[in-house]
Image (cartoon, rainbow, N blue to C red):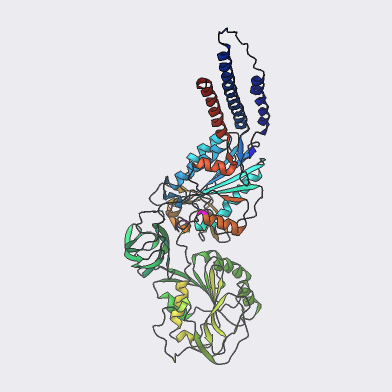
């Protein structure tokens, strides 16, 4: 047993007061004359014995009452292994209240978030009013980054609302440690009130201050069932007018029961485009395919929806993409225009094909194209190279057709800037293409059936493509000599296609072969810059929007569809593209449009983080096991004991307090004394 105020134990010396009074309580006896002395003597002996017993019992009650009152003021307690609250010092307390979407689930006391807020208030009530408190939520709001009084802290708790932002345990603990560094208090304690989802503890904790005490307070929901849309994607990133599209949707079931005939609906620009149903097993996942046709060009704002009657923040998934009527292609010619390229692209309504001579290049227009073809350039200037680098890095595709001596320094500088190998000296040996990489997306769905003796193009002469180590490349067409005929190099967001021959019949019959059309057609189609369908709120703070020309006084607005929400996001130009910084301005999922003046430039969609959708949680025992495995000696778990939470917390953090017991005992002893005086004759 220990004492909060051991100085009060000196009050036990007051026990001597009733003892002294008892010893020196002399009484004056009154003489009474009585005729029968023998009878009086017998009565006197009996009365003295009873009086001594009565006085002794009263003395004991008084001593015990005084001792109990002194001990009550000294506040005895049975300590726990490590006392968290220091009554003699000013305590600094940081309390994290999980306000993520999973805290919308129902508990035995209502909504988990409401229970967490009540727990936070009860934690504060255990401390002195002079202690300092700091509130932390997933939002990391500026007003929560300081220590306040208990009254202000309680007001902040009442203002907590559900947030789409998701934080992990390491992020929370790191922020709490950072805030404690600026606080001079020696007694520092961090409380984490959460449902402790599995993803919340998916990373290791940072190095922690050994003087910091951390207490986990786990909450448990009644219903852990959740059916949700996890993600969606297109097999081909190219969206063209009046062409079929297939949207694939991943749906997950985080519950112990299966579902049948659940509908999933696709809406695009406010109109229903597709409808399907699915069956899904318990704790399983399924993939739903939604086919439809793009009949409109421009920005397509889409929405997927299912019906789940438990947790519904993840029942919708918003995404957006762009349908282009024409794919812009620029061909830079060293000599004359290439007749084969003109025949392929100029007569096709899907492409806008433009030719320009190498001496008349408009570098500022590069951002308007998705594919640039270098057709037998006699020289490759450093200026052209400097403009092609950001074009490819930002997602553009580049096709290189060699001419003359491509093994010279000019072509070498071009290819070196993309780490795309180099050209060797002209090889005049007759050979042929012997291999097609059918596993590459460029040739997917091109051939219904491949014959055993496939007639492939013949090559009369070529410039060998020499590869370097650590090059991100794939061979699409290969010669019998094992040398590449067509290689593709992944460069940042873009691609560089390197041919071993120009499109000239003196070098090969490739341009007259049936494989020429699908190869160039798929290169052009796949050159469309792949757009990100959607972003997660709180996760993607930087969004690249490509190149948008802005005047000196023009600004970009981010507007939510069917809403008055309108913000001006921070943007920075990086080379020929622009990066947007949301800075936590987006808090509601939905479809947004990036607007310049009155013109919608781009569709941007935001969704809530699906990390909160997986309804798997750590129990108290699992948390203790986690703490033991990680050897986190300064972290403890507050487990339910059946007692009121305040009492459990008080005992856990301050030890088992006994002052109330001694107050009750003091009153009991005083009552016993009164009864002795009243009834014992």
The stretch drawn in magenta includes residue 617: yes
Q: In this view of the protein, which residue sits in the foreground, 142 or 72?
A: 72
User: Where are the magenta residues, as a range?
Assistant: 612-620
Q: Name the residue at 57% across, 65% down.
A: 390
Q: In this view of the protein, which residue sits in the foreground, 283 or 556?
A: 283
Quarter of the view holding residue 625: bottom right
Image location of residue 553, percent across then percent down? 52, 49
Image location of residue 607, percent across then percent down? 44, 56
Q: In this view of the protein, which residue sits in the foreground, 2 or 605?
A: 2
So how many labels did they put on this image?
0
Q: Check the image and report above or below for 313 versus 75.
A: below
Q: Which corner quadrant holds the N terminus?
A: top right
Q: Name the residue at 55% across, 34% down.
A: 661
Image location of residue 309, percent across then percent down? 35, 54
Quarter of the view holding residue 150: top right
Image location of residue 391, percent across then percent down? 55, 67
Q: Check the image and report above or below for 149 versus 239.
A: above
The stretch drawn in magenta includes residue 569: no
The reply, left or right, for residue 312 in relation to residue 13 is left
Q: Check the image and report above or below for 179 versus 21.
A: below
Query: Is residue 539 in sight in this rendering?
Result: no
Dominant secondary-structure state across the stretch colored magenta: loop
Query: Is residue 444 in sight in this rendering?
Result: yes
Q: In this view of the protein, which residue sits in the foreground, 389 or 351?
A: 389
């Amino acid at each position: 047993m220990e004492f909060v105020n051991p100085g009060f134990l000196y009050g036990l010396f007051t026990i001597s007061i009733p003892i002294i009074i008892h010893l020196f309580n002399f009484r004056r006896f009154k003489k009474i004359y009585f005729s029968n002395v023998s009878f009086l003597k017998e009565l006197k002996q009996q009365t003295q014995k009873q009086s001594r017993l009565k006085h002794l019992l009263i003395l004991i009650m008084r001593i015990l009452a005084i001792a109990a009152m002194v001990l009550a003021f000294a506040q005895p307690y049975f300590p726990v292994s490590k006392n968290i609250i220091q009554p003699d010092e000013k305590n600094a307390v940081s309390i994290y209240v999980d306000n993520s979407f999973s805290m919308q689930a129902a508990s035995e006391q209502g909504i988990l978030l409401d229970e967490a807020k009540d727990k936070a208030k009860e934690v504060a009530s255990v401390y002195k009013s002079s202690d300092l408190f700091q509130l932390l939520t997933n939002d990391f709001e500026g007003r929560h980054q300081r220590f306040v009084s208990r009254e202000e802290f309680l007001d902040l708790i009442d203002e907590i609302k559900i947030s789409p932002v998701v934080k992990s345990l390491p992020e929370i603990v790191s922020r709490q440690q950072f805030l404690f560094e600026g606080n001079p208090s020696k007694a520092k304690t961090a409380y984490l009130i959460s449902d402790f989802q599995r993803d919340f503890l998916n990373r290791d904790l940072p190095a922690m201050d050994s003087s910091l005490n951390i207490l986990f307070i786990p909450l448990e929901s009644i219903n852990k069932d959740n059916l949700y849309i996890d993600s969606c994607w297109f097999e081909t990133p190219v969206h063209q007018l009046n062409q079929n599209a297939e949207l694939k949707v991943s749906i997950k079931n985080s519950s112990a029961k299966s579902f049948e005939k659940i509908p999933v609906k696709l809406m695009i620009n406010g109109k229903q485009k597709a409808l399907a149903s699915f069956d899904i097993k318990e704790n399983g996942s399924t993939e739903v395919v939604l086919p439809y046709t793009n009949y409109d060009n421009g920005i397509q704002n889409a929405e997927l929806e299912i019906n789940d009657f438990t947790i519904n923040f993840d029942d919708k998934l918003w995404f957006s993409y762009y349908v282009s009527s024409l794919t812009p292609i620029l061909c830079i010619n060293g000599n004359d225009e290439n007749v084969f390229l003109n025949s392929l692209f100029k007569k096709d309504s899907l492409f806008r094909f433009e030719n320009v001579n190498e001496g008349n290049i408009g570098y500022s227009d590069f951002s308007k194209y998705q594919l640039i073809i270098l057709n037998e350039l006699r020289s490759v200037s450093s200026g052209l190279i400097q403009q092609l680098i950001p074009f490819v890095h930002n997602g553009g595709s580049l096709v290189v057709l060699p001419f003359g001596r491509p093994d010279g320094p000019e072509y070498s500088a071009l290819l070196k800037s993309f780490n795309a190998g180099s050209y060797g000296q002209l090889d005049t040996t007759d050979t042929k293409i012997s291999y097609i990489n059918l596993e590459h997306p460029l040739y997917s769905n091109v051939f219904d059936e491949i014959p055993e003796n496939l007639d492939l193009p013949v090559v009369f002469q070529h410039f060998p493509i020499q590869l370097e180590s650590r090059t991100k490349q794939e061979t699409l067409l290969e010669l019998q000599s094992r040398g590449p005929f067509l290689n593709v190099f992944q460069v940042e967001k873009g691609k560089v296609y390197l041919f071993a021959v120009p499109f000239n019949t003196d070098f090969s019959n490739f341009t007259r072969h049936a494989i020429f059309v699908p190869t160039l057609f798929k290169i052009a189609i796949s050159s469309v810059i792949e757009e990100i369908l959607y972003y997660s709120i709180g996760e993607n703070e930087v969004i690249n929007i490509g190149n948008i020309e802005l005047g000196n006084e023009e600004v970009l607005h981010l507007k939510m569809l069917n809403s008055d929400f309108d913000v001006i996001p921070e943007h920075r130009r990086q080379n020929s593209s622009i990066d947007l910084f949301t800075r936590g301005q987006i808090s509601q999922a939905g479809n947004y449009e990036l607007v310049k003046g009155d013109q919608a430039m781009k569709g941007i969609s935001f969704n809530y983080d699906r990390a909160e959708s997986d309804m798997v949680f750590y129990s108290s025992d699992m948390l203790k096991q986690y703490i033991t495995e990680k050897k986190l000696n300064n972290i403890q778990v507050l487990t339910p004991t059946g007692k009121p939470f305040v009492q459990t917390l008080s005992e856990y953090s301050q030890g088992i307090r006994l002052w109330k017991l001694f107050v009750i005992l003091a009153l009991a002893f005083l009552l016993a004394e009164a009864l002795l005086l009243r009834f014992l004759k």
